[in-house]
Image: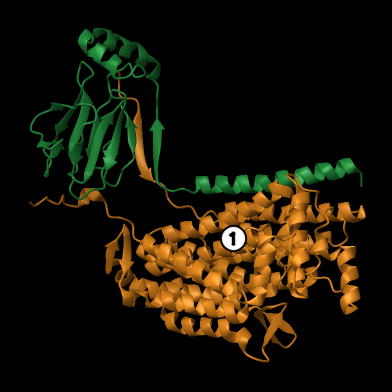
Chain colours: A orange, B green
Amino acid sequence: MSVVTNTTTIGAIEAPSRRNTELALLAFAVIIPVFAYLNVGLAMDGKVPAGMLGYGLGLGLLAAVAHLVVRKWAPYADPLLLPLATLLNGMGLVLIWRLDQSPRLIATSMNRFGTFSPDAPSQMMYSAIGIAMFVGVLLLLKDHRVLQRYTYISMVVSLILLLLPLVPGLGADVFGAKIWIRIGGFSIQPGEFAKLVLAVFFSGYLMVKRDALALASRRFMGLYLPRGRDLGPILTIWAVSLLILVFENDLGTSMLFFGMFVIMLYVATERTSWIVMGLLMAVAGAAVVGSTASHVKSRVAAWLDPFGCLETATDQNMLNACDQMTQVLMSFGSGGILGTGLGQGNSDLIQFAANSDFIFATVGEELGLAGVMVFLLLYGLIVERGIRTSLAARDPFGKLLAMGLSGAFALQIFVVAGGVMGLIPLTGMTMPFLAYGGSSVIANWALIGILIRISDTARRPAPAPAPSPDAEMTQVVRP
Amino acid sequence: MSELTLTVMRLGFLAVLWLFVIVAVQVIRSDLFGTRVTQRGSRRQEARPAQQQARQAAAPPQQRGQQSAGGGRQRRGAPTKLVVSEGTLTGTTVALQGQTITLGRAHDSTIVLDDDYASSRHARIYPDRDGQWIVEDLGSTNGTYLDRTRLTTATPIPLGAPIRIGKTVIELRK
């Protein structure tokens, strides 16, 4: 027989901090939007845009600050979350700037309001505030388990945030949906922040109650049916989300909260019956409200038959909803597979909210199917990293929180992208990071901050080294 | 701007976007933690096929017939790898290259078991002169089990039979 020459050693790989990987990806994520900016400038004016250097430096500075803070205060965090968010935010800025350049939108604004103010500079400011929020989360939240103490406070805070738009004088009715409040000259969408606070409440609550919800049940037709009194929480959340739907006229927000609760309930209890029940309740609620509330009804009509409802529309609001939907669909259609090229499409025909709710149509028209897929993959990767963090987290609260946040993020993408593409009725939500809107950008940077904090704790190597097994006695198996 | 430049830029931009996604996925791939299996030295590898052929020629004809009936693809009856199927090292495979494999908690074992119920030098697995793999208990505290019987002497290992050491189960596979 041959001499022993092959030895195989088996050892655990130490978790590297991967900060340099993050830095490289971050540089890439800053260069891509600068390239896009150049592309838009060349296509629209035929020359290198004047603001390119300033834009690149601004985005690079924000990314560098975020990276240095992560390097110092969350050294083991996931290397992908920050670059992905930076790329999406940067691309959002470019797309908003591109729509600012559109002569059609400028003319409409001049006609309607007499002035035109570009949105890109304010979005840049919101991004800076967002990064500041991200830095603040990492600096102030040294351990995500602290949030567990505020379980019931966050319940109250989230209810207040959700109900704020209904307060007379404070809430603002923007084209049917009451999801805004006006303070001073600023309008804020409290729902975006409620998303974070609610995730804290749900994870704190479910961590304590999950055994009762999972174990006390009867088996019926292959499903575990919970006891009547354990239905309390899901019924309450359902009622609250229906109230949002009825009074705030916003399908997206209510779907987001109810969906987030059902996802977290399923993750906490591992019972499929919750998902089945949740879906049935959501469908029943949406069907009832969708056939009564006028604002939701016009959205549903625009979803079912966008071109037909242009003729059958009964009022101006419905006509606007249908017109927008047809423009969006035409926009996606004219993009084709490879798109028309940045700055060369006509997605500005959507007019109102082209750079917020409908910004994905610009992606669809100017970058085509290939570009839409990239953006969906980028969002998908953020969600994947969030769920991976949840799997790696060692404490149940962190697991549920990471899962809830990434679930809410995923649902938001689904609701917005699905609405814009005509899969589900359109709602007034914004594409995270991409769309114009301060609340959305700031809240989503805070969300990424929390995920990075949890992933830092989860990936940090265990502190105490294992003692040498040779030194220990072998335990004897006792029958 | 000429049409050509714009087209090149448009396609180039899409390519760069996809490149970013691919790089990100590569980072995820290299980020999967687990156990690292390092192979060292393979000087005698070229000598292997000849030996195996010789061994096969020497095998009784009846056994050979059985093998070809079992599956035309696998000509060799000898196991080629050892697989850990239960315990902390689940999924680890070690190629069988004719060397003795020692199992135990001692650091110099071929397979270092992180198992409170394993002894420092628990068992060894080695080939006899015919190439048949043998398992032998090295006087361990809790014993080594082949299937469900505790080993008292060196015993040949049938293909796929589970060998239990503490909480760890290993088996030989083709």
Q: In the figure, is residue A181 to the left or right of A344?
A: left
Query: Secondary structure beneath disc 1?
Result: helix
Chain of the residue on which disc 1 is drawn: A
Q: Amino acid at mark 1?
A: Phe
- Please name the residue that numbered disc 1 is placed on: A414
Residue A322: quarter of image: bottom right
Who's the residue at 30% across and 35% down the image? B83
Residue A272: quarter of image: bottom left
Quadrant holding the N terminus of chain A: top left
Who's the residue at 9% across and 29% down the image? B153
Q: In the figure, is residue A184 to the left or right of A75?
A: right
**Location of residue B84 in the rendering, given as x and y in whole percent from the top left corner:** 28, 38
Whether residue A135 is visible here, answered yes or no, is no
Q: Residues within 10 Å of mark 1 (few under 14, many from 20)?
A: some
**Location of residue A74 in the rendering, given as x and y in whole percent from the top left corner:** 52, 65
Residue sitting at the far bottom: A169
Q: In the figure, is residue A277 to the left or right of A139?
A: left
Looking at this view, is A470 or B168 the one in front?
A: B168
Looking at this view, is B8 or A268 the one in front?
A: A268
Residue sitting at the far front: A312
Whether residue A255 is visible here, answered yes or no, is yes
Residue A30: quarter of image: bottom right
**Location of residue A469 in the rendering, given as x and y in whole percent from the top left corner:** 24, 50
Looking at this view, is A42 or A11 the one in front?
A: A42
In the displayed structure, A167 sits above or below A264; it is below
In the displayed structure, A270 sits above or below B20; it is below
